[in-house]
Image: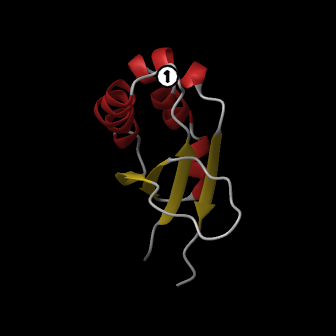
Amino acid sequence: MSKTLIMVMVEKPESVSDNEFNRLYSDDHIPALLGVPGVHGAKRYKLNKVDGDLDVPTYFALYEVDSAETRSSEAWQTAANSGEWADKVRPLITKRMAITLDPID
């Protein structure tokens, strides 16, 4: 059975360096979310190209989860609001989108 995918897109705050943003996302935030029951994997991406007139953020994280409800779980919320990422970066983010994708098969 296929898993649900959650794509989170964010624009790096101007006041945070690229190195700090990527370090905290990869080394702090992602590991915290990988500890949530129902989260099976995570991978980060940086936007390369957009075809069309879409204004999308530069950074993407794709999470493989059991279901859409995983993201609204208490464990996800606790993990998402923990660590340096939540203290140093999250309050500065002004552009963020999340999309949940359910498998068809």
Task: From the viewer's perspective, tell me whether residue 63 is left or right of residue 104.
Answer: left
Task: From the viewer's perspective, tell me whether residue 20 is left or right of residue 6.
Answer: left
Disc 1 crowd rating (10 Å Cα; few below 14, some 14-19, many 20+) is: some
Residue ID at (41%, 40%): 36
Query: Residue 38 at what x, y percent from top left?
Result: 43, 51
- Is 97 situated above or below 54? above
Q: How is the image coloured?
A: secondary structure
Residue ID at (30%, 30%): 23
Question: From this viewpoint, which residue is outermost toward the top?
Answer: 87
Residue ID at (59%, 28%): 93
Query: Residue 82 at what x, y percent from top left?
Result: 45, 21
The number of numbered badges drawn on the structure is 1
| Camera-side residue of 17 and 27 | 17
Where does label 1 land, which residue? 89
| Camera-side residue of 18 and 36 | 18
Residue type, numbered disc 1: Val
- Is 100 situated above or below 87? below
- Quadrant, the N terminus: bottom left
